Amino acid sequence: MSEMKTEAKGGSFLLKKTSTHHVYTPEDLTDEHRMIAQTAKQFIEKEVDPYHSDIEQQDFNKVVELMHKAGELGLLAHSIPETYGGLGLDKVSKGLVGEIIGRTSGYGVAHSNHTCIATLPITYFGTKKQKEKYLPKLASGEYIGAYCLTEPEAGSDALAAQTKAVLNPEKTHYVLNGTKQYITNAAFSDTFITYAKVDGEHFTAFIVEKDFEGLSLGPEEKKMGIKGSSTRTVIYEDCLVPVENVLGQVGKGHLIALNVLNLGRFNLGSACMGAAKYAFELALSYTKERKQFKTAIAEFNASKEKIAKMAARIFASESIQYRTAGLLEEALGGLYESENHKLVAKQLAEFAMECSVCKVYGSETLDLIADESLQLHGGAGFIQEYKIEQVYRDSRINRIFEGTNEINRLLLPTQLLKKAGKGEIELSKQVEHAVSELMSGQWEIPSNELLAREKQAVITTRHLFLALLGTAFQTFQANLAQEQETLMKLAEIAVGLFAIESSVLRTEKAVTRNGKEKEKLKSKLTATVVSETLFEIEKQARQLINGMLTGEKHRQYRTILGKWLNDLQSEGEFTRNRGIAREFIDSGRYVV
């Protein structure tokens, strides 16, 4: 990775400005990163794409064969240290591979699940013997992994698991009984990272092998999308698991389950971004070829507006993902072989909020792009012969995977309040400052500065978030955790803030490096990202103000919001968006 260093702590984007020197962007990729990306791209095009229909028909032997080939190329080994047969690459490389694999539907689900949540628990929390036994095989594809957390009665409330583990009289094995539901890769996995409560009380992680006595599988689930992936129930009936297969400490399984999911959420954001780019390029291709009224439909201004807004949304998602990759690498880069599991858990948790944004924004970006791409296909988009039909179906699961988007949204304000409660941040001072700045009505960015409106939008959105968070806390006090409508709307503003700030920082860094002329497209995309995001922020802020405030305070905040949003409007948006669309229509690809 480049020499970018960050002093950021998790959630700091909600509290203070970030310098361009402390943000990683796609333009910072090294030659090594590009080589890894090219390897993944060639693998998909030459090995996976030709077998697309076989995979969709659930030819799991082919999926396993392809996983072995991916292992030979090192594409399963990026997050495994060299000591144990891996490559020990950075989180940018992990995100790159995830992005490129993300467009492959069933195969991509298997690959991503294996390399992330099915492997990383052992990478970060395994003993030396466990790492020696399992990681080389997981790196090569000899073993394929699954992650078993969800149960019929424990979905979002993962720690309510009912699967039990009891130590046998000989103290050689734990006896597991219970059922895990919706388990990806179940049909062909060799290892199952399984969570159970020891003596019905102590939440603990185990490494379970497919041949362990007492493990069985239910039938394949019949799914709306990602049909080429395996999804089954995993059943433990007096399943014997050797005591040496306890992962981490008894009673500390939550440290593994919840923290590894942070990387899973980041990974999902990368995969969704890759799929969104694919759906976008399908739209470009179709609209350039399809003619109505003797004109390619890409040339109609209504189509151009869609194309421009799709491109802007992808640009923001991309900016978020690479920024977060840089943060994660700073937090975790030196910990692949650490035996200090407490430190590992702390660092995995540090950027939980940013990882949740990756998951929420990435999955909803893919949904939006898939939907608009299908719309641009017209009736053809509803026909299986056209690839967008499958993309549309496959996209839907991503808002549920790795914790629903609702759970991830609730995490954002609650995590920030927890940090304040622990004394890690001085939230009250930040809130006071934000309220003061909003009341003043003064711009903090000179109007002649590059991206002045966009930078001021970032500052104002941050002030608005903090002011409304402080008001919510004053209004509800200890009951705020139960005020989920309030928390969800605060989260929407937080997600929007991370999106616009990441886009602005990326463009500012690129212009500083290459000059305004060469980075005109990024500047236009950033302006559209900010305009579109401000519309959503306004909606959420108005609903929040109307929902929780009354009387004078209600009037006061309505006035402040209206004033600021009027000041942050941009002009000439139709012309700008037509210019953005022209660039992508001409290139036929997402390239910025």
Image (cartoon, helix red, strand yellow):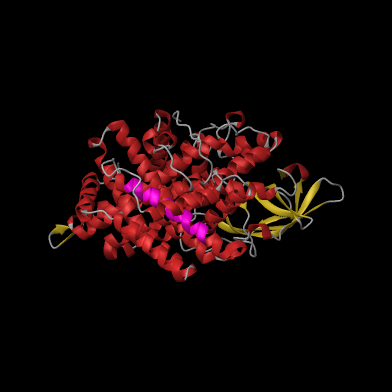
- In the image, taking residue 434 as reference, residue 139 lies left or right, namely right
Instruction: Please name the residue shown 33% across and 44% down the image.
Output: 445
Does 369 sit above or below residue 546?
above
Q: What secondary structure characterizes most of the magenta part?
A: helix
Q: Which residues are magenta?
A: 454-471
Query: Could you say which is closer to the camera, residue 422 or residue 88?
Result: 422
Residue 50 picture location, percent across and down: 39, 46
Residue 562 picture location, percent across and down: 34, 62
Does 145 sit above or below residue 409?
above
Instruction: Please name the residue shown 56% across and 36% down the image.
Output: 332
Examine the rendering and report whether any part of residue 436 can be seen. Answer: yes
Residue 81 picture location, percent across and down: 58, 32
- In the image, taking residue 151 as reference, residue 558 lies left or right, namely left
- In the image, taking residue 495 as reference, residue 513 lies left or right, namely left
As drawn, the residue found furthest toward the left would be 294
Quarter of the figure that contains the C terminus = top left
Query: Could you say which is closer to the camera, residue 47 or residue 447?
Result: 447
- In the image, taking residue 378 as reference, residue 35 lies left or right, namely right
Residue 19 picture location, percent across and down: 42, 37
Query: Could you say which is closer to the camera, residue 156 or residue 413?
Result: 413
As drawn, the residue found furthest toward the right would be 169
Examine the rendering and report whether any part of residue 226 can be seen. Answer: no
Query: Could you say which is closer to the camera, residue 318 or residue 149?
Result: 318
Instruction: Please name the residue shown 20% across and 49% down the image.
Output: 579
Does 85 sit above or below residue 465?
above
- Count the numbered circles shown: 0
As drawn, the residue found furthest toward the bottom would be 551
Q: Is residue 73 magenta?
A: no
